[in-house]
Image (cartoon, rainbow, N blue to C red):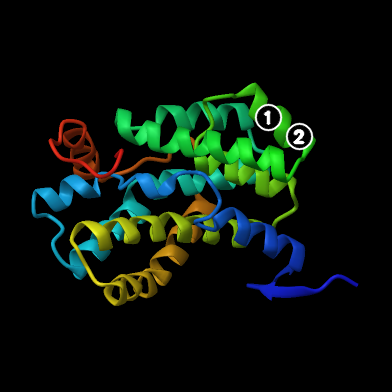
Amino acid sequence: MASTIAIRATTTRMIDLFRLLTWLSPAYPVGGFSYSHGLEMAVEEGAVSDRAALQSYIETVLLAGTGRVDAALLVAAHRGDRLDDVVDLAQAWRGTAETALEATQQGGSFASITCAAWPEPRFAAFAARHHGRLTHAVAFGAAAGWHGIALRPALVGWLSGFAASLVSAGVRLVPLGQTDGQRVTAALFPIIEAAADAAEAADLDTLGTAAPMLDQFSLRHETQYTRLFRS
């Protein structure tokens, strides 16, 4: 019998856990390390200058910004609800050119490597039908659903990976020590749980965000003179 573990009353096979951890690993070549989601501009302008400010920035992203929208889209993609509409919604919900690039470049890279290393015919057909248009959250959710990975671990895992990428960018930009970075990561767990709860309960027809300064930082980043990141 295959080994299993229990996650929030969800039974997860070890192969599913292995697959999920692989997809979320920094070694999985999606390119997340090259994006800061506007954080580079926030640091440049002094809005994020210490550990507390970094944590607050990421919390806002997760609860009121892109994390709120993308987590809900991931849930819909995992459930197979209105998949083509979900792709269109994900395209429409990009507030700036750089956040669109951030989402679709990682989505395309994820789809490409996943089709090659973890072939699944339904996901391959979906990725081919929407070549160049898949955001990371939608591609990840659809792949997890078709590969039989339970929703909650996939959702919390994706949100954790998104948050970890921003923590890593903040550690480099502020700069902060690695210990402070891990303190931020640890403090974000209840925020990630809350974001996951909200995503599972979300209605795509009424979904929205309320964090205009995040888009402002992203817009201004497009003309920032010295940049380490693509967003």
Residue 159 x/y as whole percent: 47, 57
- Residue at 76% x, 41% y is 119
Q: Nearer the viewer, residue 194 or 172?
A: 172
Instruction: Name the mark on residue 122.
Output: 2
Relative to 89, say whether 113 is above or below: below
- Residue at 53% x, 55% y is 27
Residue 113 x/y as whole percent: 63, 40
Instruction: Name the mark on residue 98.
Output: none
Report the residue that reaches farthest toward the right. 1
- Can residue 221 be seen here? The reply is yes
* Residue 70 shown left or right of residue 144 in the figure: left
Circle 1 Cα neighbour tier, 10 Å, few/some/many (<14 / 14–19 / ≥20): some
Instruction: Please state, as top left, top right, bottom left or bottom right, where the C terminus lies in the image.
Output: top left
Relative to 196, say whether 133 is above or below: above
Q: Nearer the viewer, residue 204 or 211?
A: 211
* Residue 127 shown left or right of residue 165 in the figure: right
- Can residue 203 be seen here? The reply is no
Q: Amino acid at mark 1?
A: Phe
Quarter of the image for residue 220 reads: top left
- Residue at 34% x, 56% y is 166
Query: How far apart are the two marked residues, 2 and 1, measured between alpha carbons?
Result: 6 Å
**What secondary structure is marked by label 1?**
helix
Residue 186 x/y as whole percent: 38, 75
Residue 174 x/y as whole percent: 18, 60
* Residue 118 shown left or right of residue 107 in the figure: right
Q: Nearer the viewer, residue 17 or 188?
A: 17
Instruction: Name the mark on residue 126.
Output: 1
Report the residue that reaches farthest toward the left. 46
- Residue at 55% x, 32% y is 86
